[in-house]
Image: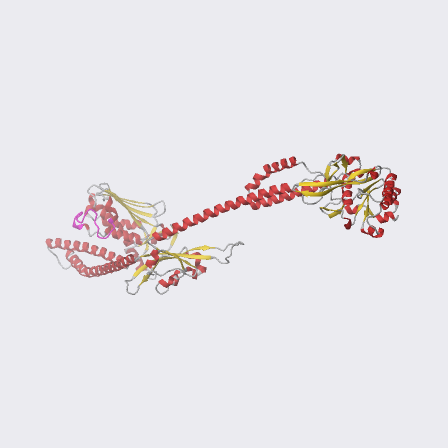
Amino acid sequence: MSKRPATGRLVLVEMDPRSLEEIGVWPWPRSIHARIIDRLMAAGVSEIGYDVDFSSRSTPEQDRALAAAIARASGKIILPAFRQRSSAQGADLHTHDTQPLADFMKSAQLGNVVFRPSVDGLIRGMSVVVPWKGGDVPAMSALLAGPAAFTQGGFLLDFGIDINSVPRYALVDVLEGRVPPSALKGKKVLVGAAATELGDQHAVPVYGRLHGIELQALAFESLVQGRALHSPRPEAIIIGLLLISLMVGNRLELLRWQTSAAIGGAAAGGFIAFVLLLQILMPIIVPPTAVVLLVASFILFSAYRDLWANAILIFRQRMNLMHQRAFIEEVMENSFDGLVVTNSYGEIVVHNDAARALLRAGDEPLERRALNEFLPANKEFLFPGKSEKKKDSQDDKRQPIVVRFNPHGEPEYYLEFMPGTFSRQTARKAPEERRTTDRVFYTYNFRDVTQRVKREISDRLERDRALEQNRAKSEVLASMSHELRTPLNAILGFSEIMKNEMLGPLTKAYLGYADGVHESGRHLLSLIDEMLDMARIDVGEFTMEEALFDIGQTLKGVMRIAEGWPETRNRFVTVEIAEDLPQMMGSARLIKQCIINILANAIKYSNDGDSVTIKVDLNSKGDLAIEVSDTGVGIEEDQIEFITKPFYRAGGVNTRGPEGGVGLGLSLVDSYVRSHGGRLEIFSKPGLGTNLRMIFPAARLFTAETPALSTPHGEEDSRRDEEKPDRPKNVIDFRNKK
């Protein structure tokens, strides 16, 4: 990543293949080495490192020629000391040390050229001084680099130095004078083997394999460029790992292993980048392997922890599913209702024994069979899966379905189904998901409702029979009332003729009888009218003619009628009418009849000296309130809810004598008020009196636009209609709706 050029202070003279070929003999005569030394010294080199083994003798003439050349170099020659492996026995390693002959060492320095490989077989560093027999021997590259190199001790080579930038020449070119002296003058020279057949090769990082003199050149350049690399002491590395463990370890362990791997990978990459930058800037090598392994151990621990946690979670989920399944099966089997689960095709997936019994399936297996096989006429509507578009709305509109079964040879029975409850297992968008469509299950619960259905049928028949009887009674009553009115009208007419002596005078006794007959007839006619209205209400044929009328005028008409009652003379009757009351849309006759009935009851069920009060006003909501209260005998609390029922008389049948009526007064009042959209309120305490209040909605109240509309519905309305026959009925002009 970072290449550094050589300084150019060292020159390699290589015993390369071309030199071997041109010289033509091997081993070379030592006279050739002597000539090389002389040539280099003549070119003015400052120092020569000769990496050739001269530990054995040659011919005397050749040895003397080399020794003379070394002597002429005057101590500028460095000869090699070798340490070679002789044998390996067990764990012991036996080596053999060799050095040049003594004749050669008289005028030369001894330099170690031994490189000790690392455990992986690669050469990465060297020692400046090596222990030797008879004393320590400095490295040849350290001797060439100068005294400053001996302060380093052991160091690592900087393989970032470009070995190809070191100047190099073939030995034969130097021998033949083909190298200009200027290229060698003042330089330090390394002479050694650079041919593969000579065997001086070593495995190194980056470059693969280098010759011995190239390794010596890298060592020289590392020393002179200040790039002799050093690594921290093991103690410092251990302390750093401990600090990293304390700062990072607990954080990486708390995270998920994917996050820990991402953070740890980024941290390891950042640390390696820091180590590379530090080595580029300074001669320091920090081994990143320990840190990377530490981070990897944290990541592996985090992954193991997550896997273990997932294994525990899966185990718990599996146990939970087993417990849920056992619980569901227990609930299903203990249920009296039939339970069935089907897939989206209507095929039975799960069922309980109650379902088998209710469907009359016998002992045959039900799984994978369609549920509609057991239903009469193939009830396809039970399966909402057939109409997926309606699945969102069906859950909110599900209703029980009663299905009638009529098996052969058995009595018919009824089952009530609740279809349409379903659960959807959506296909997830995940790599491990194989399904591409949703999985839908439908659940059905049903029960035997034979007794309930038969009871409902019986109740419906009884109810229809009762309604029919009641309708027949009402029709008979209405018919009877009409039949009774005809002779009663004749009786009333004849008695009125007799009472008024229209055809001649009668005796005083006959006149008394005529009055009695006339009053009894009028009383009987009023009872028949009440019964006729009740009959019309029962059969739904009651109608009323509506018009605007003045409630105050209507009340005055009631008071004129009440003044003729004998009991009124012994009561304190008070009338309170609010001013500016609006007109009311409704039937003046019915409202008048309601007030008469209530006032008659107040007078009838009070004693001499009691007070009766009539109030007419608008309440806080704008509704019209007509209230009649008395201080009479009152009504028991448990009888209040019944007094508006037809033919019911509070306190017993003989209350207040036979002239008290048949008990239709308050029933008709309640019906008349409700027909106007109002309500009847009753408050009473025994001995304290009774308060009856009729409330009519504000929607029926109007402010009349002309005074003519204030005329109550009655005789004056009839006269106005006769005077203006072209005016249609029930056409009302109004200005302000209350």
| Residue 199 in the image, given as x and y percentages of width and height | 76, 48
Kindly tell me whether residue 138 is visible in this rendering. Answer: yes
Check if residue 649 falls in the magenta segment.
yes
Q: Which quadrant holds residue 683? A: top left
| Residue 346 in the image, given as x and y percentages of width and height | 41, 61
| Residue 673 in the image, given as x and y percentages of width and height | 29, 52
The color scheme shown is secondary structure
In this view, 622 is above or below 525: above
Residue sitting at 46 percent across and 57 percent down? 439
Tell me if 65 is positioned left or right of 390 in this view.
right
In this view, 543 is above or below 232: below
| Residue 603 in the image, given as x and y percentages of width and height | 22, 46
In this view, 670 is above or below 482: above
Q: Nearer the viewer, residue 300 or 705?
A: 300
Determine the main secondary structure of the stretch shown in magenta: loop
- Please state the extent of the stretch shown in magenta in the rendering: 642-659
Tell me if 661 is positioned left or right of 41 in this view.
left
Check if residue 563 falls in the magenta segment.
no
Q: Nearer the viewer, residue 644 or 300?
A: 300
Q: Which quadrant holds residue 119? A: top right
Q: Which quadrant holds residue 369? A: bottom left
Kindly tell me whether residue 730 is visible in this rendering. Answer: no
Tell me if 632 is positioned left or right of 232 in this view.
left
Q: Nearer the viewer, residue 381 or 65?
A: 65
